[in-house]
Structure formats: structure tokens, C-alpha cells
Image (spheres, rainbow, N blue to C red):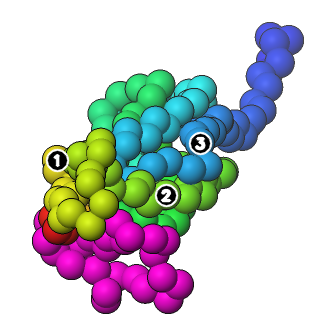
Amino acid sequence: DDDGDTDASNTISVTAVTAPPQLAIKGDASVDEDATYTLNLSAVAGSDPILGWTIQWGDGRSEDVTGNPKTLTHVFTQVGTAVIRASVTTALGSYAAPNTIGVTVKDVAPTATLVAPSTVNLNESFQVSLVNPSDPSAADTAAGFRYLFAVDGPIAAGLGYADASTNPTKT
């Protein structure tokens, strides 16, 4: 301008970059049916704090949790495999964990207490029973228990579930 001052006009474009959170999930590769499974969660917030997690347990159930817990627990009730997926929510959106966890849910055999005499006389009848049957799986327990006895020798090859009885006592 006329007084010797210089007017300068510069335009600067600024682009704000949002840093996504750094996520990871960890847990065991197997668990017994109806046992408690622990999933470890790791989230380092990016530009925004973590508002919550969504876990897809891989067994048809999912769970939404507020905040940024370090662990969550779950009970798998069906034998088989599950793939766990997780994501977090921030004010700016949802972000999936880069890894998944494959979990094998193992069957746990039922148990019962054998009740039988410690000695018997030759050619005399005696009674054998299984009492207090239990199975960690509520579904298996509801289906009932079947028993296959062989008190006079080894169980014959080829016998199985269809040959078993729902009667826990054999005379």
C-alpha cells in the first residue's frame, strides 16, 4: 500500500486426520462346554476415547459393553467351534479389531457315582447302580442319561447309545 506496509494474503488448507484406535483381542483357543471363557481386550484410544465394545461370540450371541474393560467373560453352551469378533465405538465411528479368535468348545463327559457291593458270592445276584449323574451342559442333562452296563465281562464291541438304557440300575 501507499505507506510502505505490505498486505499479504495467504490461504492455508488444513486437513484434520483422525487417528483410529489400536485394537486387539486375545483368548484361549479352546474351552470346555459350559465353562467360563475369558476374552482379553486391548484398546489404545486414537483421537477419541473408547465409548464401548461389541463382541460377537460366534455362537449366535453378541454383547454390547459400555466403556473400555480389559476382560469379558462368556459361557459357550454348545460343543463345536466359534469365531469371536470384536469392535469398538468412538464418537467418530465404529472400528473392528484386526484379529479374530477361533475357539473350539469341547464336550465334557457326564459323570456318575458307581454303587456296587465290594464282594459277592459266586452265582448270587447283586445290584449295580449309577447315582448322582451330572453333566456340565444343561442341554445334555435335560436330554437325559443313558447307561450301558457290562458286569459280567467287557462291553461287547459295537454296542453304543442305542443299546443303552435309561435305567441306572442293573441286577
Q: CA distance from mark 2 to mark 1?
A: 22 Å
Give the labeled residue for mark 2. Answer: 106
Furthest residue toward front: 122
Q: Earlier in the sequence, mark 2 or mark 1?
A: 2
Give the labeled residue for mark 3. Answer: 28
Residue type, numbered disc 1? Asn
Q: Tell me where residue 145 sits by quadrant.
A: bottom left
Q: Is residue 46 magenta?
A: no
Q: Is residue 133 visible?
A: no
Give the labeled residue for mark 1. Answer: 132
- Residue 13, percent from left and from top: 72, 40
Residue at 41% in and 26% down: 69
Drawn side of residue 42 relative to residue 115, left or right: right
Relative depth, front residue between 102 and 117: 117
- Whether the residues at callouts 3 and 1 have beta carbons within 8 Å, the answer is no
Residue at 30% in and 42% down: 118
Q: Tell me where residue 149 sits by quadrant.
A: bottom left
Q: CA distance from mark 3 to mark 2?
A: 12 Å
Q: Is residue 31 visible?
A: yes
Between disc 3 and disc 1, the foreground one is 1
